[in-house]
Image (spheres, rainbow, N blue to C red):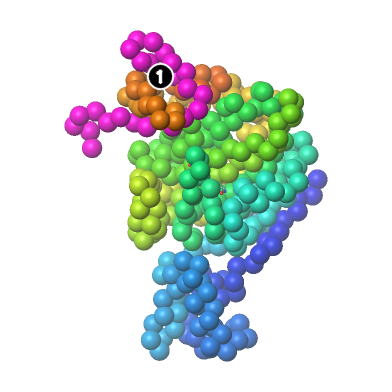
Amino acid sequence: MAVSITDSVEAPQLLVLLADGELRSGESLAEQLGQTRAAVWKAVKRLRALGIGVQALARRGYRLADPVELLNAKRIERELSEDSRRHLRGLEVLFEVDSTSTRLLTAAPPPLGLADVCTSELQHAGRGRLGRPWIAPFGSGLAISVAWSFSDAARALPALSLGVGVAVARALVRAGAGGILLKWPNDIWFRERKVGGVLVEIRAEAGGPAQVVIGVGLNVVLPPAARVQIEASGARVAAVADACAALPSRNHVAGTLLDELLSMLLKFERVGFPAFWDEWTALDALNGRPVGVRVGDKITTGIARGADMDGALLVEVDGRVQRFVSGEASLRLMEGEP
Ligand code: BTN
C-alpha cells in the first residue's frame, strides 16, 4: 500500500531560513521571502509568540537562539524498513497542532494491519498521563502518535504500554543512546531522570477489536532554557542527547522510533507482551529497589520485583508479592542516596 506522506502545515518560511542558527540580515530575509522588512519583523514576532527564540541584533539581523533540525517526512520515512513501510498508511508532519494524539483520536481509525502516524513541531495542548499537560518547548523534543487497530483487545491491551517502552528503548539504542531504562508503567529514563513518556489511549473496545492511539513524547535536545521550563513543573528531566556521544538528529530519532513502533505492533498483534518480557525485564529501572506505588490516594511501599506477563508491576510488601495493574511507581531513596 502506498504511504500518504503529508507536510500539511508547512513551517513558516522565515523559520526554515533561520533554522541553521546563522545570522541573516533583515534585508536578505526580506528579499528571499519576497516581503518587506516590516513583514519580516512581523513574522519574527509571530515566531516569538510561539515560544521560538529569535534574536534580533541591532543593524546585523536575526538568528535563532538555538539552531533546529526541522522535522521532514521524507527523512523520517528513510529510516523505515520495507516491512514497516508496507504497514504505514499515512504519515503527517505538522508544524503546530493541539495534540498529535487528539488529532488521530478524532480521525477515522486505520483498518487492521495499517498505521496512521502524526508528528508535530509544536503541540499547544500536549497531553501526558493522569490528565497532566505534556510540555515540550519548540525544537527540543519529539511528539509522535500512532493509530493502530488490534483484532484481539484482550491480548493486546493490558501490557501494550510496556511493549511501547521496549520499542522506544530499541530506537534510542539505534540512535546512539546508551543507558536508557524503563520505569513502570511507561517512563523512559536516563540516570533516573525522565527522557520521555508513553500515553496509550483506547478509542473503542467492543469485546473483540480495539483501536488505540499510542503517543510518545521524547526530550531529544534540551537547551538550558527548555530544561528550566519543563523542570518548573516539578519533573526531573534528561534528553536523549545526554545519553549520546554525538548530537542526535531529530529526524533520525523520529524515523527509528516509528520503525521500531511498527515492528513492535506487528509482533504484539501476534504474540502479545510475552515476546517482549525478557527485554523489558532487562531494561526495568526499578527491579530490586525500594518503591512507592500510588493508586489514587493510597501509596504502597515495598521492593519492586519486575512485571508479570500481563504487564502488572510486582511489589514485595512484608514478604508477600502484590500486583499493580495501574498506578504510578516512584523510587524511594535510601538514606545517603542523592
Ligand atoms: C507521560 O505523561 O509521561 C506521557 C506523555 C505522552 C506525550 C505524548 S507527545 C505525543 C502525544 N501527543 C500528546 O498529546 N501526548 C502524547
Q: Which residue is mark 1?
A: 315
> Is 134 above or below relative to 15?
above
Tell me where residue 151 appears, x and y as whole percent.
Answer: 74, 29
Instruction: Specify the farthest residue to the front.
Output: 297
Where does the magenta region start and end? Answer: 314-338
Residue in the foreground of this view, choosing between 176 and 250: 250
Residue in the foreground of this view, choosing between 300 and 36: 300
Question: For the residue marked with disc 1, what is the amino acid?
Answer: Val
Instruction: Specify the farthest residue to the left.
Output: 336
The reply to whether residue 71 is in sight is: no
The residue drawn where x is 37% and y is 32% is 330
Residue 327 magenta-highlighted:
yes
Tell me where residue 324 appears, x and y as whole percent.
Answer: 47, 22
Screen quadrant of the N terminus? top right
The residue drawn where x is 41% and y is 76% is 55
> Is 202 above or below relative to 235?
above
Label 1 neighbour load within 10 Å: few <14, some 14-19, many 20+: many
Which quadrant of the structure image shows residue 296?
Answer: top left
The residue drawn where x is 63% and y is 28% is 157
Q: Is residue 322 left or right of residue 167?
A: left
Tell me where residue 153 appears, x and y as whole percent.
Answer: 69, 27
> Is 116 above or below relative to 301?
below
Q: How many marks?
A: 1
